[in-house]
Amino acid sequence: MGLVLLRHTKPDIADGTCYGSTDLKPGANFAMEAEAVLQALPWKADQILSSPLVRCAQLADRISTSHSTQPSFHDGLKEMDFGVWEGLRWDNVPIDELNQWANDLLHARPHGGESVHQMQQRALAVLEAHGAWRADTATLVVTHAGVIRAVLDHAGVRDAWVTQTPYGGGWMLSADKSVTALG
């Protein structure tokens, strides 16, 4: 058993857009992508925790049908709020603001939204409150790339902040926090 961190499927937005906490529906291939996710899951979940944003909630609902486990939705599992960057193409974000963020990734907030550290703390609080690290419970978390990086960082994964998780992909963490990529 353990904890699976699962990224939502591809959302309905142009590639290269900063969309953090923006609530987007899944893309046109959701049904096919969700089926592939179901096939890749290592076990039936005892509990499903999910971001309430539609791109995660629909996937959590789809998984819950086959796992006979109702998802619970938590604001703490939402993607980071990128403030004024939300909806901008990444190549239109002012370079000096990107540099500020890069120079203090955990605490800088040049966009006016939340810091990476704030996002990490709220996500970890949800996992802790729901016993997600327990060895006797299979916990599935349907969330976002930023939250996944934050949890991997907490688990001691080297270079967690630059780890890439594809849409519908994820990571399995055991109770001792060893990590295995899924998919």
Image (cartoon, rainbow, N blue to C red):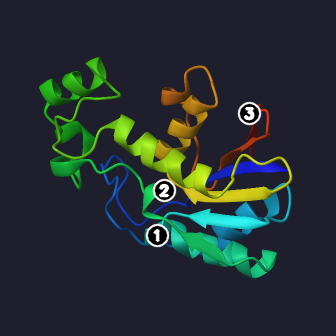
Answer left or right for 76 relative to 113.
Answer: right
Q: Which mark is drawn over residue 177? A: 3
Q: Position of residue 47 (x, y in %)?
A: 72, 66
Q: Which mark is drawn over residue 52? A: 1
Label 3 sits on what residue type?
A: Lys
Answer left or right for 138 relative to 95.
Answer: right
Circle 3 SS class: loop
Residue found 35% across the figure and 28% down from its top:
106
**The one of 4 and 23 positioned closer to us in this rendering:** 4
Q: Which mark is drawn over residue 77? A: 2
Question: Earlier along the polypeptide chain: callout 3 or callout 1?
Answer: 1
Circle 2 SS class: helix
Q: Residues within 10 Å of mark 2 (few under 14, many from 20)?
A: many
Residue found 59% across the figure and 72% down from its top:
72
Q: CA distance from mark 3 to mark 2?
A: 19 Å
Q: Position of residue 64 (x, y in %)?
A: 71, 76
Disc 1 + disc 2, Cβ < 8 Å: yes
